[in-house]
Image (tube, helix red, strand yellow):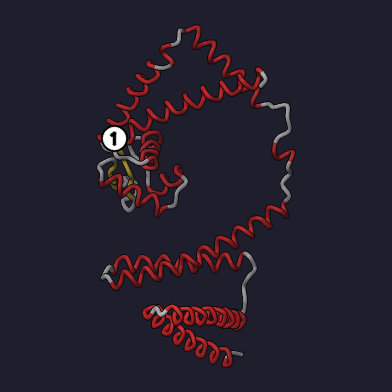
Amino acid sequence: MSKYAENAMLIMRVMRHAQAAVKSRFMQQVVPKKLTIVQFNALLHLHWYGGESGMTIGELGEHLGLAHSTVSGLVDRLERDAWTIRRKCDTDRRQKRIQLTEKSQQLFQDRAESATDFWHQTIGQLTSEEQADLIESLTRLKQVMDKPIWPSYDQLHPRDPRHVKERLEAELDELVHAKLTSIGTRFILAQMAEQQNQHELAAYLKQVASEEISHANQIFKLLGHEQSLKAALSDLIRRDRVALEAVLDLVEAAQVAGHKKSLELLQQITQDNKRYKRWFSNMFKQMD
């Protein structure tokens, strides 16, 4: 191994250790407070940008890059644990602004003192000359890394818009099929929740499934997969026929295995599927 490679590995090892030390110190401050990283990040933005007036849900969402509903739930949990408080806006009484509580203010005061102590115990162990030499060396290393003499990845692999478009469409197609699976799962869970008298949970699951259906339809439109209702129904009948054949194979297997409960369930599914087929076939014939 060349001397350059050995030195590069040593530099990267030192950087990893330094990053691990900083992260460990950060977690020591956050974890005992029972804050998640996202929650702490929200408090940081309120501390940096909110000032005395605080921020609205929308403003905080823009800073964090999160949806309004996500930020609302996040603030609810912070308020529950007394990290934030909602107050009516002086200029618009319909709006509420999120402000830090004394508990949060104390957190950042303690954190500043802790950070000072951390740097004193680490960088502070170097002499002034050593610190100056380290800063100079790291600055020079940054300059070298900012202007590499080798071609970039994008230069070696130019992005073909057509390829990117094909990749995007493939990933959208994969996403929509994942959503279709999720929709079915949510409806099944909703039915289970209703059977256990968890009606609020069932309502949420149905609502999310309904929204997922809307998302799937929009993705189909983007991909140009829109079909006439009759064509879509024809495709459904065809796929149901294939599914029925698979169920009949399972019925035969259950009979051979002598598994009574499976056999009864599969026979019921078979009868239901045949009924669905008759319904949709009749509707298909009646369509223009």
What residue is at 64 percent from the left and 22 percent from the top?
5
Q: Quadrant of the N terminus?
A: top right
Does 197 appear above or below 16? below
Q: Residue 246 location, x and y as percent?
A: 53, 78
**Residue, disc 1:** 32
63 or 147: nearer the eye? 147
Quadrant of residue 153 within the rendered picture: top right
Q: Residue 114 location, x and y as percent?
A: 33, 23
What residue is at 38 percent from the left and 66 percent from the top?
205
Q: Residue 46 location, x and y as percent?
A: 37, 38
Q: Judge the density around disc 1: few (<14), some (14-19), many (≥20) Cα neighbours within 10 Å.
A: few
268 or 112: nearer the eye? 268
What residue is at 58 percent from the left and 61 percent from the top?
174
249 or 208: nearer the eye? 249
What residue is at 54 percent from the left and 81 percent from the top?
245
Q: Report helix, strand or loop for mark 1.
A: helix
Residue type at numbered disc 1? Pro
Q: Is residue 104 left or right of residue 57?
A: left
Q: Quadrant of the C terminus?
A: bottom right
